């Protein structure tokens, strides 16, 4: 390679070598790092070199006792269950070079891109506190980007190299840069955790599957405030239709 060529790209998996005299568009393929995991419904071998972890909605409004869901009477203790497993699992992923991406609600303060159907969620009468409204206890605007409500819970501290994507639908792929980011990273396999399992986690996972990614839900790193039958149905559908599930302790990272 000529010395006057310069690397142009945002990740090793998506980089050209460019110069005034020409361009080399051959992207270097990372060496495979296979890892066999005790997944359900059967063991699976993934490539750590092409894997990323998606953490969905571990935010104050869903997981904090003073957040939105708690303010309307929802027991948020099930949404807090993934916190400890994630605290132990995420550093292990970072240590072996697996990117961690936080995909969180972060709506526009003016709510201009939200439909009535979204505004209706948890505010069926129109007189309650829905998306973008100020909570009586904290004054924070529900799931609004930049507010306390939309912040990641304090127990989970993102790493310096982690990525963040704001969403404004149940799916983290709808009208966001998530797909573009993953393709630039050269990722083909996605691990999923967060809340709620049967809502934003499942919808993001399903869209990932539709886009051609391999999808695996990390069970102990995922929770839901919905009834147990919703959790069981989610596990069934993930294993039956979209991919696999696994416990973090059954991913023996090198």
Image (cartoon, rainbow, N blue to C red):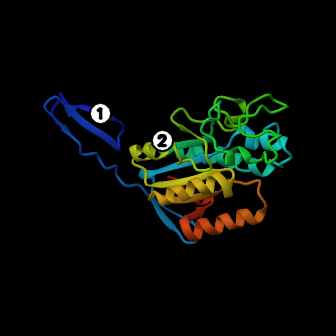
Q: In which quarter of the view is residue 39 placed?
A: bottom right
Residue identifier under label 2? 177
- Count of marks overlaid on the render: 2
Separation (CA) of disc 1 from disc 2: 20 Å
Mark 1 or 2: the one toward you: 2
Residue identifier under label 1? 8
Camera-side residue: 117 or 2? 117
Q: Where is residue 187 in the image (x, y as percent from the top left)?
A: 43, 50
Which element carries disc 1, helix, strand or loop? strand
Identify the mark nearer the N-term, 1 or 2: 1
Quadrant in the picture for the N terminus = top left
Q: Which residue is drawn at 43% across and 54% down?
A: 188
Q: Where is residue 10 in the image (x, y as percent from the top left)?
A: 37, 35
Q: Residue at x 20, y 40 (%)?
A: 24
Which element carries disc 2, helix, strand or loop? loop
Crowd rating for badge 2 (residues with CA inside 10 Å; few <14, some 14–19, many 20+): few
Camera-side residue: 87 or 58? 58
Q: Position of residue 42 (x, y in %)?
A: 55, 71
Camera-side residue: 165 or 152? 165
Q: In which quarter of the view is residue 227 placed?
A: bottom right
Q: Do the residues labelled 1 and 2 touch (CB within 8 Å)?
A: no
- Most distant residue in the left direction: 21
Q: Is residue 40 visible?
A: no
Q: Is residue 228 visible?
A: yes
Residue 185 placement, left or right of 253: left
Q: Position of residue 217 (x, y in %)?
A: 59, 58
Crowd rating for badge 1 (residues with CA inside 10 Å; few <14, some 14–19, many 20+): some
Residue 150 placement, left or right of 26: right
**Image vertical order of residue 141 relative to residue 79, above or below:** above
Residue 92 - label = none
């Amino acid at each position: 390679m000529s010395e006057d060529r310069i690397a142009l790209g945002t990740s090793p998996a998506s980089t050209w070598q460019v110069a005034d005299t020409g361009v080399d568009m051959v992207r270097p393929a990372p060496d495979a790092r296979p890892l066999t995991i005790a997944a359900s419904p059967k063991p699976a071998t993934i490539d750590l070199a092409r894997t990323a972890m998606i953490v969905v909605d571990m935010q104050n409004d869903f997981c904090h006792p003073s957040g939105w869901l708690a303010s309307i009477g929802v027991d948020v203790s099930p949404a807090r269950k993934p916190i400890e497993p994630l605290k132990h699992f995420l550093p292990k992923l970072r240590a072996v070079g697996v990117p961690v991406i936080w995909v969180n609600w972060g709506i526009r303060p003016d709510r201009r891109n939200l439909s009535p159907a979204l505004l209706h969620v948890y505010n069926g009468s129109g007189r309650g506190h829905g998306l973008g409204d100020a909570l009586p206890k904290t004054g924070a605007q529900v799931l609004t980007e930049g507010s306390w409500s939309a912040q990641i819970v304090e127990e989970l501290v993102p790493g310096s190299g982690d990525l963040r994507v704001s969403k404004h639908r149940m799916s983290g792929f709808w009208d966001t840069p998530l797909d573009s980011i993953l393709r630039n990273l050269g990722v083909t396999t996605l691990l999923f955790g967060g809340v709620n399992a049967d809502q934003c986690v499942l919808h993001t996972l399903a869209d990932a599957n539709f886009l051609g990614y391999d999808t695996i839900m990390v069970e102990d790193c995922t929770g839901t405030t919905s009834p147990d039958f919703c959790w069981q149905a989610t596990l069934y559908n993930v294993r039956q239709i979209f991919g696999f599930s696994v416990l973090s302790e059954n991913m023996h990272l090198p």
